[in-house]
Amino acid sequence: MTWQEQWLHQPQTLWFRRIIFQFHLWSGLAVGLYIVAISISGSILVYRVSCVKRMNHSLTSSLFGRTFN
């Protein structure tokens, strides 16, 4: 079977295709993790003030009297 026939009928057996697949798999995972890290850090920067207020609720409010700012 020539490589052209193999490319059409059994492409998974070609070594070049396996190398390209592995490169595509690992580079896609790396780029995906990078995008997730950028997204999470961006969300933290945007919602930083409300997150701090929610986590430290006892420092910003009181049972009696006014709410502190």
Image (cartoon, rainbow, N blue to C red):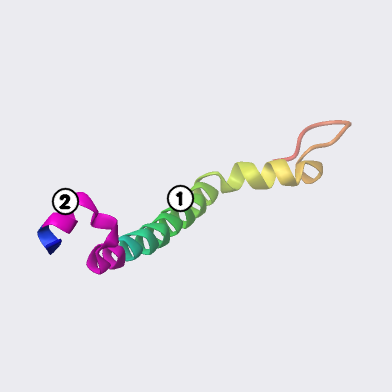
In front of the other: 18 or 68: 18
* Number of numbered markers: 2
**Residue identifier under label 2:** 8
Q: Residue at x 88, y 31 (%)?
A: 64
Residue 36's place in the image compared with 54, above or below, is below
Which residues, given as a range, are shown in magenta? 5-20
Label 2 vs label 1: CA separation? 40 Å
Q: Quadrant of the N terminus?
A: bottom left
Image spot of residue 18 (x, y percent): 30, 64
Determine whether, in the image, residue 42 is placed left or right of residue 65. Answer: left
Magenta-drawn stretch contains 13? yes
Q: Residue at x 32, y 65 (%)?
A: 23
In front of the other: 18 or 8: 8
Quarter of the image for residue 27 reads bottom left
Magenta-drawn stretch contains 15? yes
Q: Could you tell me which secondary element the residue under label 1 belongs to?
A: helix
The rendered magenta stretch, by its main secondary structure, is classed as: helix
The numbered disc on residue 39 is: 1
Name the amino acid, label 1.
Ser
Q: Nearer the viewer, mark 2 or mark 1?
A: 2
Image spot of residue 25 (x, y percent): 37, 59
